[in-house]
Image (tube, helix red, strand yellow):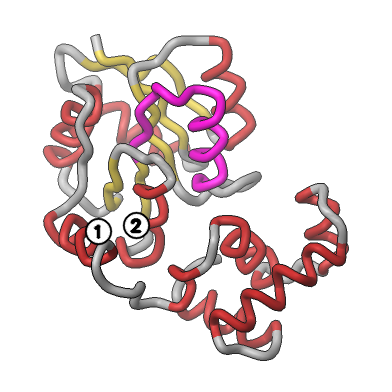
Amino acid sequence: MIKVIVVDDHPVVRRGLKQIIEGEPDMQVAGEAKNAGECLSLVRKMEYSLVLLDIALPDKSGFEVLKQLQHERPGLPVLILSVHPENHYAVRCIKAGASGYLMKEGAPEELVKAIRKVNAGGKYVSASLAERLASHLYTPNELPHENLSDREFQILRLIAGGKSLKDIADELCISEKTVSTYRSRIMEKMKMSTNSDLTRYALDNHLV
């Protein structure tokens, strides 16, 4: 039996995913979580075949949850589910260890196919994402934020979310000076000069 934990903050979405998954005789939703905290708590207590993880959660981003799961349960496959187009998060998620990236607008049959492939130890990506991943091996990243490190990307999203350097420092348990240094690197890499520029970019590209 393929035991899936569904992580999404919308009850209607969780119910819909559960109906699709449990429509298969060899699959079951063995756990549900509405935020990052619940997800990590359940994964620490129980054994699952894979995690179906929404990228946008209320308490922590799915990307951060993915990295935490990679640290705590490196053998547990994670299939990312998102409303964001692939060019926003997909490459970063796959490089961070996700076993697949799936758009919420996809067909139910695609979800079932992805779960089976990931459970079997494979990777599930669309043809367009596979091409994009291949291009990253040979050409520079196309979008400015894709040139950022994971920590820089995290701080970019926090700045764009309206948090002060002190707030960010407290949340990440680092000094304000360190946050300021990261901010300078982000500005340099993205060729921007103000927080407003970063925020506008993040909003335009649906990063927050």
**Helix, strand or loop: magenta stretch:** helix
Circle 2 sits in a helix, a strand or a loop, which is it?
helix
In-image side of 49 versus 34 (left or right): left
For the residues labelled 2 and 1, the Cα–Cα distance comes to: 6 Å
Residue 77 visible in the shown view: yes
Does residue 20 appear anywhere in the picture? no
Mark 1, secondary structure of its residue = helix
Residue 77 painted magenta: yes
Tag 2: amino acid: Val
Find residue 63 and report its horizontal and vertical position in percent.
50, 47
Task: Report the residue at 24% width, 23% height from top.
Answer: 119
Badge 1 is on which residue? 133
Residue range of the region highlighted in magenta in the rendering: 62-79
Circle 1: is it few (<14), some (14-19), or many (20+) Cα within 10 Å?
A: some
The residue under the point 61% across, 83% down is 188
**Viewed as shown, does residue 77 lie left or right of 204?**
left
